[in-house]
Amino acid sequence: DQQVKQNSPSLSVQEGRISILNCDYTNSMFDYFLWYKKYPAEGPTFLISISSIKDKNEDGRFTVFLNKSAKHLSLHIVPSQPGDSAVCFCAASVYGKLTFGQGTILTVHP
Amino acid sequence: GAVVSQHPSRVICKSGTSVKIECRSLDFQATTMFWYRQFPKKSLMLMATSNEGSKATYEQGVEKDKFLINHASLTLSTLTVTSAHPEDSSFYICSARYTSYEQYFGPGTRLTVT
């Protein structure tokens, strides 16, 4: 039972353009959502988060949108940079415990 | 951000032996730490929640007698994989809770059981 789903296994974007990563969830108890990036053989690095009581949070090049009625969130990165290339995971939290999506391999081409 | 370390970064052991992995929060105290495992090209799966001074709570399907967790201090949690088998080979990652919603992750430990 995959409670957090990232249906796109990969995304390829040109440098300078927008990257949009999507995530769907099923558990309405999730109260906080986070995005991480991860490189092979390393731990996840935090990107941005959003509380379930908000619909948008922006931090520099990163913006996360939350649509609670659709149980959907998205991460926008603009402008995308080659250094953003990584596996991007969305995660949802309930009682502080995280459930991760499968990840999307983001490749930003110079 | 806060720093979490793991040791060792990689370990190879023979089937039937036990392996201990340490997770340390270096610049903050963490009453709660989490242990995850990640199989190749898969997501991170929460194994257990480690609480300082009390027993760990395990997720469904995780054998508590096989994956022993000890959280003896506010900066250290250990995961011991007992009687390891090749199917236990995986990437184990810990995290330390910084605030109610923030967790900082360690760099992970690659376990290979031969």
Image (cartoon, rainbow, N blue to C red):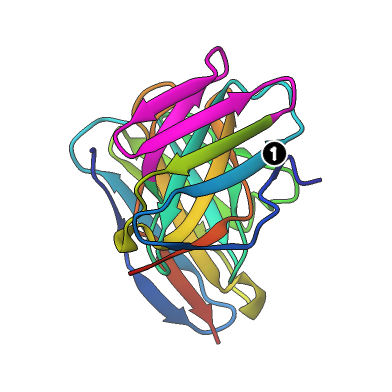
Q: Farthest left residue? A: B27
The chain containing the residue under callout 1 comes to A
Query: Is A14 above or below relative to B68?
Result: below
The structure residue drawn at horizontal position 50% and vertical position 66%, both measured from the top left corner, is: B91
In the image, is residue A96 above or below residue A42? above
Q: Compared to A80, does B40 lie above or below?
A: below
Q: B22 or A83, which is in the foreground? A: A83
Residue located 64% across and 49% down the image: B64
Which quadrant: the C terminus of chain A? Answer: bottom left
Residue B50 in the image: state x and y as whole percent.
48, 37
- Asked if the stretch drawn in magenta spans residue A59, the answer is yes
- In the rendered image, is residue B104 in sight? no
Which contiguous range is marked in magenta? A46-71
Pick out the residue farthest to the top.
A53
Quadrant of the rendered image containing residue A108: bottom left
Pinpoint residue A56: horizontal percent, then vertical percent.
49, 22
> Quadrant of the rendered structure where residue A83 is?
bottom left
Residue drawn at x 36%, y 23% as measured from the top left:
B99
Q: Quadrant of the N terminus of chain A?
A: top right
Tag 1: Cα neighbours inside 10 Å, few (<14), some, or many (≥20)?
Answer: many
B91 above or below A46?
A: below
Lateral position of residue B1 relative to residue B49, left or right:
left
On the image, the x and y values in percent for residue B114 come to 55, 87
Secondary element type, mark 1: strand
Out of B15 and A60, give the one closest to the viewer. Answer: A60
Q: Specify whether B114 is left or right of B59.
A: left
Q: Say which amino acid is labelled 1.
A: Asp
The residue located at (68%, 21%) in the rendering is: A68
Residue where numbered disc 1 is placed: A24
Q: Is residue B10 visible?
A: yes
Q: Is residue B56 left or right of residue A39?
A: right
